[in-house]
Image: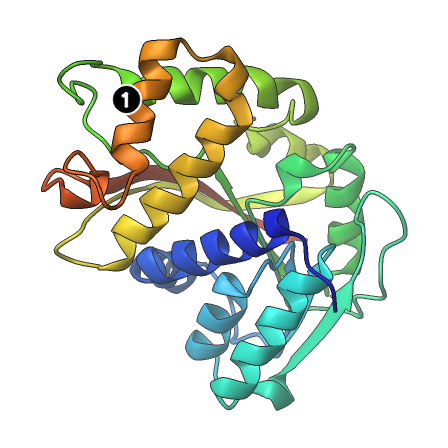
């Protein structure tokens, strides 16, 4: 299997996200208003398996079908399933959800985390999920407004607001090809035939003292964001990013005590009547 550098970086970022936010993912799953423990679960846009493995841990009798467009993500997910001794409970399906869908069977629970906003027609996808679920089945829709933040707004001292400006430019560019990010999914779920069974927002603040992966996550994620919008950043910002992202330099972000992952994730639980 041949992988591009972009795919390798994205795979690592997904693994780091799963590691750093494992406690928060578990808390979302524990909150879900399931009426009975699901046996058949679908993870839509599974990535490298953050949701898949958290669901398997919480529902020990369940089997999960992990759906993703990326063969590298699914290959990594299968590797982790074998390493965790749950390969017999995981089935993978490579699919572009804007095109032909795989046969999802009749799941009791569908988990869709940070995936629906990527779709060209998410409303059609929600209707498909609704029709696939068993009566009384649940869709857990988890969405985030944007990529996590890592630095206080006042740093670095010579260029305060550095990360704020980076995110603003990244959001401006993303708006064109991800117009559904940040949407209020409640009305759209009802329009697809669901009954809302719960809604909440999870706020995460994870410092480096709680997880060594925070620094690696920040380094990979911010470097990728900087590279994507470098042509629009002022020279002074680019110079500040070079200092922060130089792991061998005295100004490396890995040497900062104030480095922490900060993010919010919104969750909708929607039931097929």
In this view, 168 is above or below 205: above
Residue 71 is left or right of residue 60, and the answer is: right
What residue appears at the point 61 percent right and 47 percent down from the top-left corner?
6
In this view, 237 is above or below 148: above
The reply to whether residue 145 is visible in this rendering is no
The quadrant holding residue 103 is bottom right
Count of numbered labels shown in the rendering = 1
Tell me residue 66's x, y (percent): 66, 67
Tell me residue 258's x, y (percent): 12, 37
In this view, 2 is above or below 124: below
What residue appears at the point 37 percent right and 19 percent down from the top-left corner?
238
Q: Going by the picture, which residue comes out furthest to the left? A: 257
Residue 53 is left or right of residue 22, and the answer is: right
Circle 1: element type: helix
* Neighbours of disc 1 within 10 Å: few (<14), some (14-19), many (20+): some
Tell me residue 173's x, y (percent): 59, 18
| Between 114 and 77, the one nearer to me in the picture | 77
| Between 187 and 96, the one nearer to me in the picture | 96
Tell me residue 74's x, y (percent): 66, 67
| Between 182 and 36, the one nearer to me in the picture | 182
Residue 53 is left or right of residue 45, and the answer is: left
What residue appears at the point 78 percent right and 59 percent down from the top-left corner?
132
What residue is pinned by disc 1? Answer: 240
């Amino acid at each position: 299997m041949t992988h591009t550098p972009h795919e390798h970086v994205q795979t690592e970022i997904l693994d780091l996200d799963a590691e750093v936010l494992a406690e928060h993912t578990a808390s979302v799953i524990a909150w879900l208003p399931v009426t009975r423990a699901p046996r058949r679960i679908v993870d839509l846009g599974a990535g490298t398996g953050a949701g898949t493995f958290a669901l398997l841990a919480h529902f020990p009798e369940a089997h999960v079908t992990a759906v993703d467009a990326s063969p590298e993500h699914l290959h990594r997910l299968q590797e982790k399933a074998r390493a965790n001794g749950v390969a017999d409970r995981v089935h993978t399906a490579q699919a572009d959800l804007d095109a032909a869908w795989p046969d999802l069977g009749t799941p009791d629970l569908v988990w869709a985390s940070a995936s629906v906003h990527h779709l060209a027609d998410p409303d059609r996808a929600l209707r498909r999920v609704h029709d696939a679920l068993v009566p009384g089945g649940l869709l857990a829709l988890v969405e985030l407004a944007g990529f996590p933040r890592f630095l206080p707004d006042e740093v670095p001292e010579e260029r305060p607001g550095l990360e704020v400006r980076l995110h603003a430019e990244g959001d401006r560019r993303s708006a064109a090809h991800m117009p559904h990010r940040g949407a209020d999914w409640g009305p759209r779920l009802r329009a697809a035939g669901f009954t809302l069974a719960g809604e909440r927002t999870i706020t995460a603040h994870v410092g480096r003292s709680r997880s060594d992966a925070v620094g690696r996550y920040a380094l990979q994620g911010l470097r990728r964001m900087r590279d994507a919008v470098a042509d629009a950043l002022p020279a002074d910002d680019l110079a500040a990013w070079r200092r922060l992202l130089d792991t061998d330099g005295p100004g490396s972000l890995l040497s900062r005590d104030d480095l922490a992952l900060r993010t919010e994730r919104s969750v909708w639980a929607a039931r097929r009547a």
